[in-house]
Amino acid sequence: MQNRFSRTFLTLSLAAGLTVPTVALAAKKDAKKPAAAKDGKKAALVLEETSDAAFGYTIKIPKGAKVLQKEEYGHTFSAPLPGGHEYNVSLGKVQAASLDDAINTATMMGTKDLTEKKDADGLILVVKAAEFGVVEVWTFVKEKELSAKCAGPATETAALVEMCTSLKAK
C-alpha cells in the first residue's frame, strides 16, 4: 500500500505543480519487480471480455480484475500486479470528434508526449509516453460518447493497447 499511496501522491503533486518529496521517489524506486512464473518466465496476461448493455460497451480486461466503480458515467476495473503496479481500465462517456480532440482529451493532464496516435476502423487511439514508469492508452469510439483509458506499467504497453483497442460500442 505504501507504493500505491506514494505513486498517487507523486502523480497528484506533479499535476498540481508541487515539489515532489524524495520519500515518494524512494518508495517508487524500491518497488519490487513483477514476480516470475514458476518456470522463470513472466506469467502470461489473460484477457476476458466484459460488457455492459446499459453503458453500451464490450471490452477485454485482465481476467480476475476487480470492479472499482460502476456509475452512470464511468466504469473502472483494476487488476493489481506485484510491486504496487496495476492494470487499470476506465470507461467513460466522452466523445472525440477527431484525432485532435482525442489528443486534447488524453493530454489534458500529465505528459503531452505521444508514442502513437491513429484514427482507423471507427476507433481513435492515443498512446502517451511513459511517465514515472506508467503508460496511458486512450481509445475513443468515433461518433459515440464512449472512451476507454488503459493504464499500467510501461513494460506492458502492448497489452494495454490490446485491451483498449478491443473497445466496441454495443
Image: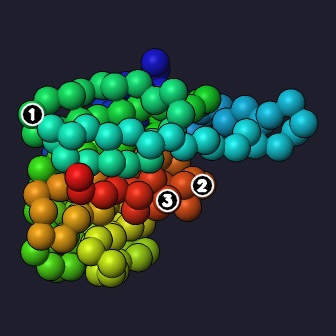
Which numbered disc flags the more N-terminal residue, 1 or 3?
1
Q: Position of residue 115 (x, y in %)?
A: 43, 74
x, y percent for residue 46 = 61, 41
- The residue at 10%/74% (across/down) is 97
Q: Please name which of the two marks, 2 or 1, marks the residue nearer to the observer.
A: 1
Residue at figure coordinates x 34%, y 56% from the top left: 167
Q: Amino acid at mark 2?
A: Thr
Q: Earlier in the sequence, mark 3 or mark 2?
A: 2
- Name the outermost residue toward the right: 39
Along the viewing direction, whichever of 114 and 139 lies nearer the viewer = 139
Q: How is the image coloured?
A: rainbow
Q: Residues within 10 Å of mark 1 (few under 14, many from 20)?
A: few
SS at mark 2? helix
Give me the C-alpha separation between circle 1 and circle 3.
25 Å
In this picture, is 29 found above or below 129? above
**Observer-nearest residue: 141 or 86?**
141
Given the image, on which type of amino acid does mark 3 rest? Answer: Glu
Location of residue 78 in the rendering, given as x and y in whole percent from the top left corner: 41, 32
Disc 1 element = loop
Task: Name the residue carrying label 1.
Answer: 72
Q: Residue at x 40, y 62 (%)?
A: 165
